[in-house]
Each structure stands twice: as structure tokens, then as C-alpha cells.
């Protein structure tokens, strides 16, 4: 039996759909009952028979920081997909990020070892991959992580979570780690994920920053995860990205797919430096939630380029072109808008 953590998130819900559509016996963890509706909605995109597939899932209410509840979820499990994570770039959320991303992952690894799990797949992020001083050089799996860099709190905790997974591999657990770029997929239009970008652009996002990043289709991510778990590959990590793209170009392509205005104004780095300082001041004086940190401002003005050749070679994989992904997600966004 397969266990999926984070089953109500973007990756987890799409993974559950693919696993159940292949007839796999699956148990999934959720934290809040209302989030189950999000997973159901994702299922409804892809099949008329989605309710029957969804109902084959054995749902367990548990938290990855709650070991007794987790132990119950691990009974009769052979393979684990660890998708659960807390995503935030707010510096004041560092303790929560550590608790969920690092300690929670340590709990999953320890239980995998205790229950003699055959294989663990951990969903990390390109944020946990090292950087390069040469902007023209592609970042790959061997790029070294520099703890002296001014890394975001999210990146620090995802890297720390990876260390727990690799520690598990040294203790005899077979693992694979995937490091996706910005994951494009439907159903989650609020919050800080890629879905909110589609909503913002539709509502008239009129600015862009100088930076750029790497993007990947959610269905490519789950397809690769399953193929890695079914393969003989173990104790390897893979960057999962389809294309590297400037934020301006992503906004333009998405605006076109959504049939909205493509006019954009560039926000200069010095303007962002002023804005993150004002954001910090508002937080200190009025307790306002942080929306722009120093590290996030740096990230969105930097151009990072990642190399996907390792996974393409390992699985002879062809990624979905970015324009196809953007078109597909945009169509589903517009459909949800009408419903």
C-alpha cells in the first residue's frame, strides 16, 4: 500500500489522481477536513468517473509533527511519497517552517526506517539547490549549497529537510528526491503558489521584476515521481524543470492565454529595496503580515537557470512545453471562474 503525505496540496492531489487511476491502493494524510474539497476538485478536472476514483483513497487525519497519529498511518505501507510542506518566505515564520519541513520530514524518515518502508520519494524544491556565481552557467544537482548566503527561510528549511532524507539513506532507506521548479497546475488559485499567479495576472497584474526562474507542469512532476519509485533508481536527486523563463515572459504568455492585457511596467531593484524595508517597518509597528522580505526581493530580481539533463537522461523523459502547460492551466482557471 502507498502512503501520500500532503494529499490535499497541488502535487499531492494530482499524485493521488494518477495513482488511483492506475489502480493503486492508496492511503493519504490530511490535516484539515475542508481541504479535502480541493483534492476532490482536482479529480473532477480529469475524469467523469472521478468520484469512484476518489473514494478508493483511505484518508487519515494526521499531522507530520504528530508521531502517534503518523504511526497509525504507516501500518501496512510499503512506499511513501512525502509531499507535505509549509511554504512561506516570511522570516517570522521560521520556527513553523523548521517544525514542519525539517522535524516533520525527520519523523517521516524515522517511521520509514522503523516500518521497513521499501522506498521513499521526497518532494523538495529548486530552492534547496545550490547557486552559481556565473549567471550563464546552468545550476545542476552538483551545485553546492552555501550556508553563508542570505538564503530565504523556506530554502533553508527545505535544504534541512533534504539532509534528513539523505540521513535516512545512510541508515538503509532507499530514497529518491525531486527538486521541482515553480509548479504549474490547476485548482489552487489562492495562497502563494503558482495558481495565485494566474489569478493575479487575470485581475490585471501590471508589473514585473527583472528576475527569472524555472517552471514545470504538475503532471510531469507526479509522472516522474511514480516512474522513479517504480524504477531501480535509488539514493539520487533530480531537478525537475521544463524551461527557464524570465518573469516578464511568463506574465506575457499567461496574459495571452487568459486573454487579458499584456501591458507591464518594470519594478526596478532599488524600488523593491525600498518596498521590503517599508514592509518590515509595517510589520514591526503594526504587526502586519510580511509580504516582501529582503531575501524574496533578491530572488525575484535574480535570473536563475537550472539544468534538467540528469532526469531527462535517467528516464528518457520529455517535459511538457511551458506554453502548453500555461494554456491548460489558464483554460481550467477560466472554467472555474465561470462555475
Image (cartoon, helix red, strand yellow):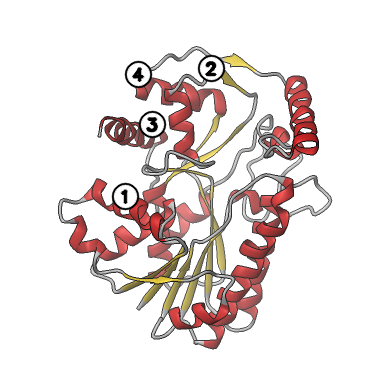
Whole-number angstrom distance, CA of label 4 to CA of label 3: 14 Å
Kindly identify the residue that appears in the image at 39 percent across and 55 percent down.
34
Whole-number angstrom distance, CA of label 1 to CA of label 2: 29 Å
Q: What residue did someone put label 1 on?
A: 42
Q: Quadrant location of residue 135? A: top right
Whole-number angstrom distance, CA of label 1 to CA of label 4: 23 Å
Query: Of the residues under marks 1 and 3, which one precedes in the sequence?
Result: 1
Kindly identify the residue that appears in the image at 63 percent across and 16 percent down.
266
Using residue 215 as the reference point, say whether residue 65 is left or right of it: right
Q: What residue did someone put label 4 on?
A: 259
Q: What residue did someone put label 2 on?
A: 206
Residue 223 seen in this snapshot:
no
Q: What residue did someone put label 3 on?
A: 323
Task: Say which element carries label 2.
Answer: loop
Query: Of the residues under marks 1 and 2, which one precedes in the sequence?
Result: 1
| Image marks 1 and 4: residues in contact by CB distance under 8 Å | no
Q: Label 1 crowding class (10 Å Cα cut-off): few <14, some 14-19, many 20+?
A: many
Query: Of the residues under marks 2 and 3, which one precedes in the sequence?
Result: 2
Position in image of residue 128 (x %, y %): 65, 53
Amino acid at each position: 500500500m502507498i502512503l501520500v503525505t500532503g494529499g490535499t496540496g497541488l502535487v499531492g492531489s494530482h499524485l493521488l489522481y494518477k495513482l488511483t487511476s492506475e489502480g493503486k491502493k492508496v492511503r493519504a494524510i490530511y490535516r484539515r477536513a475542508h481541504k479535502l474539497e480541493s483534492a476532490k476538485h482536482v479529480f473532477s478536472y480529469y475524469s467523469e468517473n472521478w468520484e469512484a476514483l476518489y473514494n478508493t483513497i483511505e484518508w487519515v487525519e494526521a499531522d507530520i509533527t504528530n508521531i502517534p497519529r503518523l504511526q497509525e498511518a504507516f501500518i501496512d505501507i510499503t512506499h511513501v511519497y512525502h509531499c507535505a510542506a509549509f511554504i512561506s518566505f516570511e522570516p517570522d515564520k521560521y520556527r513553523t517552517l523548521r517544525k514542519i519541513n525539517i522535524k516533520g520530514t525527520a519523523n517521516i524518515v524515522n517511521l520509514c526506517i522503523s516500518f521497513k518502508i521499501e522506498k521513499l520519494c521526497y518532494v523538495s524544491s529548486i530552492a534547496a539547490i545550490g547557486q552559481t556565481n556565473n549567471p550563464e552557467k546552468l545550476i545542476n544537482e552538483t551545485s553546492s549549497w552555501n550556508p553563508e548566503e542570505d538564503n530565504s527561510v523556506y530554502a533553508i528549511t527545505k535544504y534541512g529537510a533534504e539532509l534528513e532524507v539523505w540521513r535516512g539513506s545512510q541508515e538503509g532507506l532507499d530514497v529518491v528526491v525531486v527538486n521541482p521548479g515553480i509548479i504549474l497546475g490547476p485548482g489552487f488559485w489562492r495562497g502563494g503558489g503558482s495558481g495565485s499567479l494566474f489569478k493575479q495576472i487575470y485581475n490585471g497584474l501590471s508589473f514585473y521584476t527583472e528576475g527569472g526562474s524555472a517552471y514545470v507542469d504538475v503532471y510531469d512532476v507526479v509522472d516522474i515521481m511514480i516512474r522513479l519509485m517504480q524504477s531501480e533508481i535509488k539514493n539520487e536527486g533530480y531537478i525537475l524543470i521544463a524551461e527557464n523563463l524570465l518573469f516578464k515572459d511568463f506574465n506575457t504568455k499567461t496574459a495571452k492565454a487568459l486573454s487579458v492585457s499584456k501591458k507591464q511596467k518594470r519594478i526596478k531593484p532599488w524600488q523593491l529595496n525600498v518596498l521590503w524595508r517599508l514592509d518590515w517597518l509595517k510589520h514591526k509597528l503594526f504587526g502586519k503580515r510580511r509580504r516582501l522580505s529582503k531575501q524574496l526581493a533578491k530572488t525575484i530580481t535574480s535570473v536563475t537557470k537550472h539544468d534538467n539533463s540528469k532526469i531527462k537522461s535517467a528516464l528518457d523523459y520529455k517535459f511538457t512545453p511551458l506554453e502548453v502547460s500555461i494554456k491548460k492551466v489558464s483554460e481550467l482557471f477560466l472554467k472555474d471562474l465561470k462555475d
